[in-house]
Image (cartoon, rainbow, N blue to C red):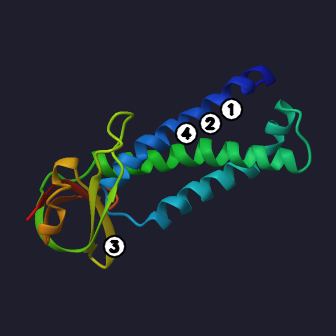
Amino acid sequence: MNKKQRKVFYPTLFFLGLILMAWQISIYRNTIIDLKILIGIILLVGILAFFMDVKNYGKTYKYNGIGLYFYAAMQYICGFGFIVCSLFMLSNYYLAETEPIKKEFEIIERSSLPGSGKYRKHERQPTFNINYNGELKELVFPHKYYEKRNFYSIIELETRKGYFGFDILEHKNLK
């Protein structure tokens, strides 16, 4: 790949990684997986890509010293790291088993998030924390449950086993 091609390749990869990261957040909310695993995948892939390609990055852009290493590390972590992590999450989610399992969990803690979108910031979304097989999982519900959030004590989940063994949330109901 020549210098001109790399000047297009690196920014494209960077922005693709950022776009996939935003999509990955919605997949993460419906997957029972430890955040440390995802951060580990992002950093491991980003660091490996850094060591394999930092010379080409230095030939493409006129950075040197600490600037070269900083910008290259950000490029590889946000580009390669987020892309590979997104592929991992999407594979686990979309290649999951088809048989759902229903389970009930007691609500441990309640909180809320601001609404999404420019005109819905005042519509708070209730969040509920449950103990899912020894891990604390935060579940976000639509605004319509906000007023009665203190009356719910149990969450019924319908889950499927993901491709890599991490559970996928299919449906969630408040009781």
Q: Residue at x 29, y 50 (%)?
A: 124
Q: Secondary structure at mark 2?
A: helix
Alpha carbon of mark 1 to alpha carbon of mark 3: how far?
Answer: 37 Å
| Label 1 or label 3, whichever comes before in sequence order | 1
Q: Is residue 131 left or right of residue 172?
A: right
For label 2, the residue is 14
Look at the picture and state if 1 lies above or below 44.
above
The N terminus lies in quadrant = top right
Residue 106: quadrant of the picture = bottom left
| Label 2 or label 3, whichever comes before in sequence order | 2
Residue 13: quadrant of the picture = top right
Q: Is residue 128 left or right of residue 58?
A: left
The amino acid type of the residue labelled 3 equals Leu
Q: Residue at x 77, y 20 (%)?
A: 4
Q: Residue at x 66, y 30 (%)?
A: 11
Alpha carbon of mark 1 to alpha carbon of mark 4: how far?
Answer: 11 Å
The amino acid type of the residue labelled 4 equals Gly
For label 4, the residue is 17
Q: Determine crowd level at label 3: few under 14, some 14-19, many 20+ residues with C-alpha closer than 10 A.
A: some
Q: Nearer the viewer, mark 4 or mark 3?
A: 3
For label 3, the residue is 136
CB contact under 8 Å: marks 1 and 3: no
For label 1, the residue is 10
Look at the picture and state if 23 lies above or below 112.
above
Alpha carbon of mark 2 to alpha carbon of mark 3: how far?
Answer: 31 Å
The amino acid type of the residue labelled 2 equals Phe
Q: Is residue 162 left or right of residue 170?
A: right
Give residue 118's mark: none
- Place of residue 132 in the rendered image (x, y in percent of width and height, measured from the top left): 26, 73
| Label 4 or label 3, whichever comes before in sequence order | 4
CB contact under 8 Å: marks 2 and 1: yes
